Image (cartoon, grey):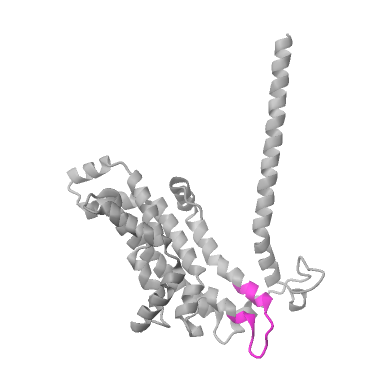
C-alpha cells in the first residue's frame, strides 16, 4: 500500500514538473515571438500614422487614426514611381532565382551522382570560394563588368547567378547524395542516360531542396542592397531595397519621411510572404531534410 502511494506521488510530481517545463517553454517561445514580431508591428503601425505622430515623445505605440493615404503618397512622392522599383525587384529576383536553381542543380548533380577524375578536389575548390569575402572581389568584378559595359544594367546582378553559387551547390549536392543509388541502376536499365536520370529521377525527388534554394535566392536578391548600389546609378533601374534610400531626404529637405519609408517597406514584404505561403510545404520539408535554417 505504501509503495502504491509512493508511485502515485512520483507520477504527480513528474506531471507537475512536466507542466512547469511546458509552461516555461511556451513562455520562452511567446517572448521570442513578441521580440521578433515587434519590428514588423512597428513598421506597419508607423506606415499608418499621421506624420506628426511618427517621431514624438512620449512614443505613440499605435496611431490615433489610420492614415491609409500614406501608401498612395509614398508610391507617387518620388520622381520615379515605387511601382517601377517593384517591377525591377520582381524582374531581378525572378531571373536570379531561376538562374540559381538551374545552374546550382546542374553543377551539384555530377558531384553527387557521377564518378570522374578530380571530382573531390574540384568540389573542395568550389567550397573554398565561400571563404572569400565579398569585399575582396568587389573591385575586380566592377572593373570586369565596366569593361563589358554592363554597368547601369541588370546584367552584373543576373548573369553570375547562371554560373551556380557555391552555397546552393553544396546544399543540393548533399541532398542528391541521399537519394538511393538503386534508382540510378533501375533508370539505366530502362535506358536513361545521365541527363534523363537527372531530369526524370533526381530533380523531381529533390523538389524540397530546390524549393529552399528558390526561396533563399529570391529573398536574397529581393533584399540585396550593395550589389544594386554598386552597379546601378539611374533611379529608373533601382530595385525596392535601393529605392527606399530615396525617402531619406526629399528635394530640398533633409527630413526622413518615415511613414512613407515604412509604407514601402510593408509593400516590399508582401511578395516574399506570398512566395513563402505558396511554397510553405516545400520550404518546411526542405528545412527538415537538409537541416538548413534561413
Q: Is residue 72 left or right of residue 205?
A: right
Residue at 76% across, 66% down? 62
What range of the chain is rendered magenta?
246-264
Q: Quadrant of residue 261?
A: bottom right
User: Residue 121 at what x, y percent from top left?
Assistant: 29, 54
Q: Is residue 69 visible?
A: no
In this rendered view, identify the residue nearer to me: 294 or 40. Answer: 294
Q: Is residue 26 above or below residue 159?
A: above
Residue at 37% across, 67% down? 161
Q: Is residue 249 above or below residue 190?
A: below
- The residue lying furthest to the right in this view is 58
Determine if the magenta segment contains residue 148: no
Which quarter shows the N terminus? top right
User: Residue 275 at what x, y percent from top left?
Assistant: 49, 61
Q: Is residue 118 visible?
A: yes
Q: Is residue 201 left or right of residue 190?
A: right
User: Residue 72 at what x, y percent from top left?
Assistant: 63, 79
Q: Is residue 282 left or right of residue 178?
A: right
Q: Is residue 205 above or below residue 74?
A: above
- The residue lying furthest to the top in this view is 1
Q: Quadrant of residue 247?
A: bottom right
Determine if the magenta segment contains residue 256: yes
- The residue lying furthest to the bottom in this view is 252
Residue at 78% across, 68% down? 60
Q: Is residue 73 left or right of residue 118?
A: right
Q: State the count of labels.
A: 0
Residue at 79% across, 70% down? 64
In this rendered view, identify the residue nearer to me: 168 or 210. Answer: 168
User: Residue 20 at what x, y percent from top left?
Assistant: 71, 35
Amino acid at each position: 500500500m505504501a509503495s502504491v502511494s509512493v508511485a502515485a506521488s512520483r507520477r504527480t510530481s513528474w506531471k507537475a514538473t512536466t507542466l512547469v517545463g511546458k509552461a516555461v517553454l511556451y513562455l520562452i517561445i511567446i517572448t521570442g515571438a513578441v521580440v521578433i514580431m515587434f519590428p514588423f508591428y512597428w513598421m506597419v503601425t508607423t506606415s499608418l500614422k499621421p506624420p506628426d505622430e511618427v517621431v514624438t515623445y512620449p512614443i505613440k505605440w499605435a496611431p490615433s487614426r489610420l492614415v491609409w493615404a500614406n501608401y498612395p503618397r509614398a508610391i507617387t512622392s518620388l520622381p520615379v514611381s515605387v511601382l517601377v522599383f517593384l517591377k525591377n525587384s520582381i524582374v531581378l529576383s525572378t531571373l536570379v532565382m531561376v538562374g540559381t536553381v538551374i545552374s546550382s542543380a546542374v553543377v551539384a548533380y555530377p558531384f553527387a551522382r557521377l564518378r570522374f577524375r578530380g571530382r573531390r578536389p574540384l568540389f573542395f575548390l568550389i567550397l573554398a570560394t565561400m571563404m572569400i569575402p565579398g569585399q575582396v572581389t568587389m573591385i575586380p568584378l566592377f572593373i570586369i563588368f565596366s569593361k563589358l559595359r554592363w554597368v547601369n544594367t541588370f546584367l552584373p546582378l543576373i548573369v553570375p547567378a547562371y554560373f551556380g553559387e557555391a552555397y546552393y551547390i553544396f546544399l543540393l549536392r548533399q541532398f542528391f547524395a541521399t537519394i538511393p543509388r538503386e534508382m540510378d541502376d533501375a533508370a539505366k536499365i530502362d535506358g536513361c542516360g545521365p541527363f534523363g536520370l537527372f531530369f526524370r529521377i533526381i530533380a523531381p525527388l529533390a523538389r524540397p531542396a530546390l524549393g529552399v534554394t528558390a526561396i533563399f535566392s529570391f529573398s536574397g536578391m529581393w533584399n540585396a542592397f550593395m550589389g544594386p548600389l554598386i552597379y546601378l546609378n539611374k533611379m529608373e533601374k533601382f530595385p525596392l531595397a535601393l529605392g527606399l534610400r530615396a525617402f531619406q531626404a526629399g528635394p530640398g529637405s533633409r527630413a526622413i519621411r518615415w511613414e512613407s519609408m515604412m509604407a514601402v517597406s510593408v509593400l516590399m514584404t508582401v511578395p516574399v510572404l506570398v512566395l513563402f505561403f505558396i511554397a510553405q510545404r516545400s520550404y518546411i520539408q526542405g528545412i527538415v531534410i537538409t537541416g538548413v535554417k534561413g
